[in-house]
Image (spheres, rainbow, N blue to C red):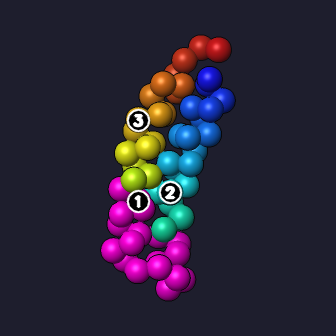
Amino acid sequence: MITLTKIFSYTGLLLTILPSLLVFANMISLDTAKIIMLVGTIVWFIFTPSWMNKNS
């Protein structure tokens, strides 16, 4: 369960970072990047607290 949560968490982090690089490379529009980054941020904040700072 923790492994699946970490996968979702890191996917959210990737969705937060990657769009800015794609806008810089002129591959996607700024509006599309904003939507993707918002979704990534929401996913990150939902899944990350469930596994960070927990003793294994």
Q: CA distance from mark 1 to mark 3?
A: 14 Å
Q: Is residue 42 magenta?
A: no
Residue 33 seen in render: yes
Q: Residue at x 41, y 35 (%)?
A: 46
- Magenta highlight: main SS: helix
Highlighted range, magenta: 20-38
Image x and y of residue 29, in percent: 40, 80
Which amino acid, mark 2? Leu
Label 2 secondary element: helix
N-term mark: 2 or 3:
2
Q: Is residue 37 magenta?
A: yes
Q: Quadrant of residue 7?
A: top right
Mark 1 highlights which residue? 37
Indicate the quadrant containing the C terminus: top left, top right, bottom left or bottom right: top right
Query: How many dots with numbers?
Result: 3
Q: CA distance from mark 2 to mark 1?
A: 6 Å
Callouts 2 and 1 close, C-beta under 8 Å: yes
Image x and y of residue 16, in percent: 46, 57
Mark 2 highlights which residue? 15
Disc number for residue 6: none
Label 3 secondary element: helix
Q: Residue at x 50, y 57 (%)?
A: 15
Callouts 2 and 3 close, C-beta under 8 Å: no
Which amino acid, mark 1? Met
N-term mark: 2 or 1:
2
Image x and y of residue 42, in percent: 37, 45
Callouts 1 and 3 close, C-beta under 8 Å: no
Q: Residues within 10 Å of mark 1 (few under 14, many from 20)?
A: many
Mark 3 highlights which residue? 46
Image x and y of residue 20, in percent: 47, 70
